[in-house]
Structures are given as C-alpha cells and as structure tokens.
Amino acid sequence: MIWIIVALAALLLSVLGWGVFEAGWLRLVELEVPIPGLPQELDGLRIAHIGDLHLGARSHGHRAVVDAIGWVSERKPDLVLVSGDLLSRPRGEAELRRLLGRLENCFVVLGNHDFALSRDPFSRPSAVRELEPATLLFDEARSVEIRGKRVQIVGVDPRTYHARRAAPQLLADPEAALRICLCHFPGIAGRMPPQSFDLICAGHLHDGQIALPYPGGKLRFAYPRERRGRGLIRRPSGLLHLSAGLGTTFLPFRIFARPEATELLLRSCSDG
C-alpha cells in the first residue's frame, strides 16, 4: 500500500512539475488566413495576435509573455492585436506598459481579469484607461491606413459584454477594406449578425489551461463544453481566431495547453 501512495505522489509531483514548465513553453504560430473579398493590396498583411498576459501574478507564464513580445517586436507585423486579460494584479502595470511600448501599431482591449470579474480569488482589479503608445479600445472603433487601404478595428468592453449590451457590429464600417472585431470573449462571435466582420480576434479560454487529450480532441477542464480552444473557427458573423493566450490564472501552470503567440498572414480569396 505504501508503494502505491509513493507512486501516486511521485506521479502528482511529475505532473505539477511539467505544468510549471509548460506554462513558460511558448508556441509560436504562423497561420494563413483566407479572407473573402480582401483587396489585393492587403494580400499578405501580417497581424500578430496575443492575449491573456495575466501580468502581476507569479507564474512561468511571465516568461511566455516576455518571449512573445520579443518575437512580435522582431517580426514587425503590420498590426498587433492584444485580446485582453492584461493584468491579474496591479503590480504588473509598469511592466505591461514597458512591454507594449515595444510594439508598433498595437491595439488592445481589456478582459474580465482586468476588472477582477473572475472566479480567481487571487485576482485584483487593475483596469487602466490608456496604454499609450498602444491604443486601448473600449466600445469604440479606430481606423488605420495600411498600403493605401483603410483597416478598421472595433473594440469590445468586457463590462458591456457581460451585461449583454455589446453591439460591435453597429460600429462596423462596410466601406472599410478590412473590418476586425477585437474582444476578449470568443462568445461575441455568436452574438452578432452574419458577415458583421472579416476577422474576429478573441482569447479567454487559455485552451483550457489544464486539459486531457483523447483521440480526436481533448477535455478542457476549465471549459468542458468547449470543443475548440484555439485556432481558426468559421462563424456566420466572421472568421474567429481564438488565441490560447500566454499567462495563467488561479493555478500557475498549464497542462496540454501551451501558451501561444500567433502571426496571422491574411490572404485574399474569392467569396466562394
């Protein structure tokens, strides 16, 4: 009996040790994204998407955040999108500003952890109102000109999302060459009419953070009903890119849910 207990304890310690290691083991992804009707001038547009930084918490996820920012900064994409949950505690704000200051053409939204709207008892509210030189969006839109074409980014405030009052589609400009919705929650894709946006970028799920693979998929313990935790997902309202995120929450490790930074390479394709 004692050997069974020892073996189980050793297995548990091994799993926890792996989880701590994996929390800092960054996956770098380059992903081609077909956008129907994208103007030829924007074919090859590069967009970096990161999220769920959770700075201020003690976790190996901090290393993943630093490595991700360094990778994005070196690649110099046309746009950088950060999909919320920037801070788990206010003490991370100075580093957040320093890291985001390295990124050009960067647009950011907040997430529920930035307001401590979470089941995590260790989370503390630390919402910021601006992050210059990065552009922090609430329920508002901004446009930038890239290669002579207008690209619109519409942000979603996590508080109006929670109150079910968010309506980013009302801010979408049909005249823009590319319309992007930036929201912390992937559920926004199911709350908008068809063809609201060309691209929707979200996070929140951490790909489950702790997961158990099985043939054809994996069980995400934090979100057991979710069949997809990362990658491209076609929705009627637009093409959703769901980031696995970078940091951790509640528990300082990841298991079969590596942190991730993604560069989206947009490609023009026909509507068919």
Image (cartoon, grey):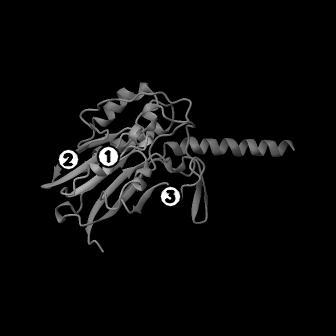
Left or right? Give the position of 16 relative to 270: right
Q: In which quadrant will I find the C terminus?
A: bottom left
Query: Dot 2: few (<14), some (14–19), or many (≥20) neighbours within 10 Å?
Result: some
Q: Nearer the viewer, mark 2 or mark 3?
A: 2
Contact flag, marks 2 and 3 (Cβ < 8 Å): no
The residue carrying mark 3 is 228
Q: Residue at x 47, y 40 (%)?
A: 247
The residue carrying mark 1 is 81
Q: Which is more toward the observer, 235 or 5?
A: 235
The residue under label 3 is which amino acid type? Arg
Could you tell me residue 270's position as x and y percent?
26, 72
Q: Nearer the viewer, mark 1 or mark 2?
A: 2
Measure how far apart labels 1 and 2 are at the Cα level: 13 Å
Could you tell me residue 28's position as x and y percent?
40, 52
Is disc 2 placed on a helix, strand or loop? strand
Q: Is residue 202 visible?
A: yes
Q: Which is more toward the observer, 61 or 123?
A: 123
Q: Give the numbered dot on residue 143.
A: 2
